[in-house]
Amino acid sequence: MPDTAPPGGGRHGPPRRRADDVRRTIDGVWAIESAKVIARVARMVGDVGLAEDLAQDALVAALERWPVTGVPDNPGAWLTATAKNKAVDLLRRRATLDTKHQQVGHDQALTARPPTVEDEAALDDDDVGDDLLRLMFIACHPVLTRDARVALTLRMLGGLSTDEIARAFLVAEATVAQRVVRAKRTLRAAHVPFELPPRDELGARLASVLEVIYLVFNEGYSATAGDDWLRPELCSEALRLGRALAGLAPDEPEVHGLVALMEIQASRAGARTTPTGDPVLLLDQDRGRWNQAQIHRGLAALDRAAALGGVRGPYALQAAIAACHARARTADATDWEEIAALYDALAELTPSPVVEMNRAVALAMAFGPAAGLEVADALLDEPLLRGNHLLPSVRGDLLDKLGRYDEARREFEVAASLTRNGRERTVLLGRAKQAAAAASWPPGSRPPRSAPGVPGPRHDD
């Protein structure tokens, strides 16, 4: 039953504490229900930007009313009904009412009886799911820039505030707000309909959705800037979106491939940093700290992707690589030849300098550092890798393994100067210092590969 205790306190404690409890409840409800509210209203008004504004108005109404009346039995239905009724009021006030009648006629937007909480609570889950899937495709529409797609997805589907998104990506809140506003304007100007893509566009549009989710995950898994190596909240949000998409599109193998990849990679989170927050890369991690439940979920998702048949896509291939690591009880037990073969397949399917760089590491582990360095050296003139710290980091590690310590030191120093992540910079400078010390050793002698607290190769797939 709704909480209708009087404002004087009573069994719920002092009014201030009750208000704080209700506010926390509202925040939790909004995180869970906001995407559904926006999706349902967008279907009604045909404009995701307007739908998000109306959903925000409903949130404000909840913040004003629930501390007094109590949280309703079905808060999500309350928010949706409130947002829809605000939409009806808005549309009735507009001079272009006849045009809006055509847009919303199929959803009974302007019927004599406004939508009620009971109406929304009785909606079929599949109907709501279809609306959520439409919202995902629109938030990740290719007419938007990559940054705008990420911001809009986290805002509309993740329920994150502009401040939360800004803090997660270390950019100004005004920058995120501007991206969201421009994205809404762009969608409106392009007359993007609130519907699923036509069958002939589905593959490309789905790839855009998957790209956005994985971009969010990667920023959490290996932060590109700042002082933290991990941003777990972004990994969690990407996983939530991926799992939701798998439930909405269960027959798409690449969706399950992406979920498998994220689950297996996220399983290592507890082993990827020292107690002080310094990075611990794959070969140095305590595998006993890997989350076995997440590994099992990831392997199950990979099996689902395989069961759906067809050629393995890029996410399924990367998940298969991650699975090789997950199945190895020790670093020495890793099947690097299988990983190298999977990277060969990935490079053939989606050739890119980043794939080649990771393939170089896999070849080095499978067949020796010289084999890997040959592939890495071929990337030196690659324009897309200029200014990126990863190639000199990989080359430094391979040169170090070949005993070419002076060259390795220079590569590590270059990599340290290019990275924007403070933790990674510390690691790379440590490797440079180690290589400088190794260069002073007598010819033929070999110092330990890495000092305590100084991770080895950058390969962490």
Image (cartoon, helix red, strand yellow):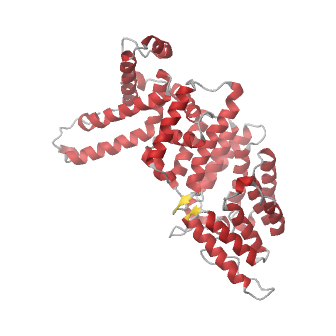
Asked if 233 appears above or below 204 in the picture, the reply is: below
Residue 437: x and y, percent?
A: 68, 83
Asked if 103 appears above or below 311 in the picture, the reply is: above
Q: How many marks?
A: 0
Which residue is pictured at 68% across the width and 61% down the height? 390
Which quadrant is home to the C terminus?
bottom right
Which residue is pictured at 68% across the width and 44% down the height? 257
Q: Does residue 158 appear in the picture of this structure?
A: no
Which residue is pictured at 73% across the width and 73% down the height? 408
Residue 354: x and y, percent?
A: 72, 54
Asked if 334 appears above or below 245 in the picture, the reply is: below
Q: Nearer the viewer, residue 108 or 148?
A: 148
Which residue is pictured at 45% across the width and 28% down the height? 51
12 horizontally vs 146: left or right: left
Q: Does residue 134 appear in the picture of this structure?
A: yes
Residue placed furthest toward the bottom: 442
Which quadrant is home to the N terminus?
top left
Residue 215: x and y, percent?
A: 60, 47
User: Which quadrant of the figure has residue 418?
Assistant: bottom right
User: Which quadrant of the figure has residue 150?
Assistant: top right
Residue 274: x and y, percent?
A: 54, 69
326 horizontally vs 49: left or right: right
User: Which quadrant of the figure has residue 373?
Assistant: bottom right
